[in-house]
Amino acid sequence: MNSKITEAIQFIKTQFHHQDFIPLHVPHFGGNEKKYLMDTIDSTFVSSVGAYVDQFETLMASIAQSQKAVAVVNGTAALQVALRLAGVKPNTEVITQALTFVATANAIAYNNAHPIFLDVDIDTMGLSPMAVQNFLDEFGEMREDGCYNKSTQRKITACVPMHTFGFPVHLDELMEVCNKWQIPVVEDAAESLGSTYKNKHTGSFGQLGVFSFNGNKIVTCGGGGAIVTNDTKLGDKGKYLTTTAKIPHPYEYVHDELGHNYRMPNLNAALACAQLEQLNSFLANKRTLANEYNVFFEKNGILFRTETPNTKANYWLMCVQLENKIDRDLFLKTTNENKVMTRPIWQLMFRLPMYNQCKKDEQKNALFLEDRIVNIPSSVNL
Ligand SMILES: *Cc1c(COP(=O)(O)O)cnc(C)c1O
């Protein structure tokens, strides 16, 4: 194992031009970023209205193959509002995966709803349609107004699959189960900008989808998010709810419901537009690195994770899967000691104090992956 790891460190260092320290993921600003930022300052429109916000929403709708996109202050806020739009109400339940970043669960909790943590598939590392079906076969009950959990008598108001590291979940199968049980799907596509399933963009399968433009994502605008949907009425409602629920009027302030100030400032939207223009080149660059990693790790005897059939992953954060936890711990320790940054996958949500009382299933695959998956340096690399 030691020699395999030493070889891997050498290979990664060569890929990243022998920098002193190789981070996991850093942004790349190689386009119109400065120009667009200067435009916003020159125009004085730096805050939450401006031409770049409109341009960003148009661009995002087109990239995500959706009718409408709403610019939001960050991905977590986008998911919180998307869940509200889908009809998530206090004291209802929302199905999601335990193997995710904490924001997925937090967005559910902000709506005062209860997460149900179900297992992921080994191949996609995302929510398993079979796990959802098994759960609903055991606990689901169809009533006039939707699906209920018969063990708690609470309504199940949404299902949130997360496309882990940009690998799309089995969307056809998941949509079929959720449609059968009339549960709206809200895709947490925060990590999967540029990833497609059967040539259709992730985030466009569910009733709503959300993206993040945080500093560590494939495209960043400092901080930002987007809600996408093919239901233009829901999209308009999303804009209104994230704009303090203000009824459009030339000069009067009328708010007729509890809204949020979750708008994306024009400064950030300017950066987002410049970054989105480079998305295709980022994707191509990452795919090249993924191919090189794949060839290397195959020879090296470590499993490099690749996209599943019928999908195209964005290879946002690339990862290897070690044989067991002992090997994983050694890989993490040795790489980090050698200034090649690597990181284990997240702690499963039900281990966190605020979610340790939540309903969960057996988690066979999530537990397996938790012990073995390690992210490796994945930046756009020139
Ligand atoms: C990044 C991320 C988010 C949240 O995005 P922010 O913009 O950081 O709020 C949500 N879900 C997942 C899975 C993420 O990786």
Image (tube, rainbow, N blue to C red):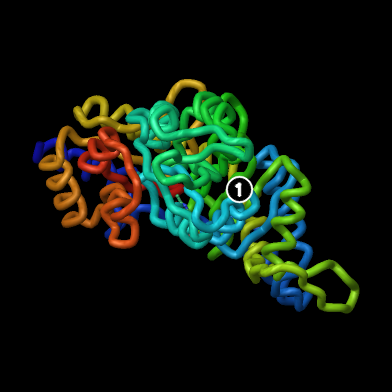
Is the CB atom of the residue marked by disc 1 within 8 angstroms of ligand 1's nearest atom?
A: no
Residue at image x 44%, y 39%? Answer: 150
Residue at image x 34%, y 56%? Answer: 355
Amino acid under disc 1:
Gln
User: In the image shown, does 74 or 130 lie closer to the viewer?
Assistant: 130
Q: Residue 79 occupies which quadrant of the picture?
A: bottom right
Residue 352 percent location from the top left of the image: 29, 58
Q: Is residue 375 left or right of residue 324?
A: right
Residue bearing mark 1: 278
Q: Is residue 276 left or right of residue 162?
A: right
Residue 15 percent location from the top left of the image: 34, 43
User: In the image shown, does 43 or 345 lie closer to the viewer?
Assistant: 345
Residue 85 percent location from the top left of the image: 65, 52
Q: Is residue 195 left or right of residue 240?
A: left
Quadrant the N terminus occupies:
top left
User: In the image shown, does 40 or 77 lie closer to the viewer?
Assistant: 77
